[in-house]
Image (tube, rainbow, N blue to C red):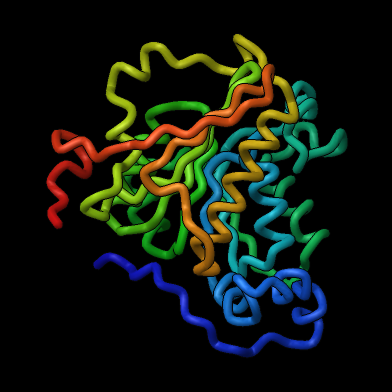
Amino acid sequence: MSRPTTITANFNMNETEAERFSRHTNLAEIGAEGQQKILNSTALVVGLGGLGSPVAIYLAASGVGKLIFADFDVVEFSNLQRQIAHNTQSIGTLKSHSARQTCLAINPDIEIETIDEVLDADSLEQIVPQCDVVLEGSDNFPTRFAVNEACVKHKVPLVSGAAIRFDGQVSVFCGHKPDVPCYRCLYGDDSMESADTCALTGVLSPVVGMIGTVQATEALKILGGFGKPLEGRLLLLDGLSMEWREIQLGKNPKCPVCGDVEG
């Protein structure tokens, strides 16, 4: 059974939480109700690298009640140029554990679970239904495709980001909705053959931070029930000229994952 992703607000914010999140609750669009929804929510962060680092830090600081960090890789010296959830003392430790330590130092009142193995269809089948949103920042298409398929099946919004060289992109995929595309509507099997990596081509460190921060913003909008998420829209960043542009995305009726979704 798919888990509904509508978060309810049970008003039980304590005095410490009220003070910590006062800058959120002072915003009319969020208020105490929206912040309580964030506190009651669960988010899965796939990949705790350049994108997942700012995602994890801002979701923890914003009070997402439960975070699940999935990454089987360890921190390397070359990661520290951009992966801000880790530090020199983290080298050799699992990224999920390092990010957990960083986030709990910011907000010790949240729950953080770590998954230190490759996510496959079976593990995603167990994890994704627990979540209200999934944020994807891995560096390979097989993982992205598997995460997307699980999100469509269980009707969980997917916030996907990517960055390389001086460029980045981000969107919210809700393929379970009849008029919103999923990740596979945009990328086919041939994408795996042409995928570049930061290790091969390089990336400007603040670019991953900019995209990751947008991902965190979109997730909080979904969880808190405010604003207009990037559903059906792909936001593109050209860091060299510092220009943002938006592309409208349509659902692919022949998509192997969500093409059979009916209105």
Q: Is residue 185 left or right of residue 165?
A: left
Q: Depth check: 9 or 68 in front?
A: 9
Q: Is residue 261 above or below residue 139?
A: below
Q: Residue at x 36, y 44 (%)?
A: 232
Q: Depth check: 123 or 131 in front?
A: 131
Q: Is residue 196 left or right of residue 110?
A: left
Q: Position of residue 199 (x, y in %)?
A: 63, 15
Which quarter shows the C terminus? bottom left
Quadrant position of residue 182? top left
| Outermost residue, right side | 89
Q: Is residue 41 above or below residue 160?
A: below
Q: Residue at x 52, y 65 (%)?
A: 223
Q: Depth check: 28 or 67 in front?
A: 28
Q: Is residue 228 above or below residue 243?
A: below
Q: Residue at x 52, y 27 (%)?
A: 139
Q: Position of residue 162 (x, y in %)?
A: 54, 30
Which quarter shows the N terminus? bottom left
Q: Number of marks in the image?
A: 0
Q: Residue at x 68, y 29 (%)?
A: 207
Q: Depth check: 60 or 204 in front?
A: 204
Q: Is residue 121 left or right of residue 77?
A: left
Q: Position of residue 118 (x, y in %)?
A: 47, 38
Quadrant position of residue 95? top right
Q: Position of residue 177 (x, y in %)?
A: 26, 55
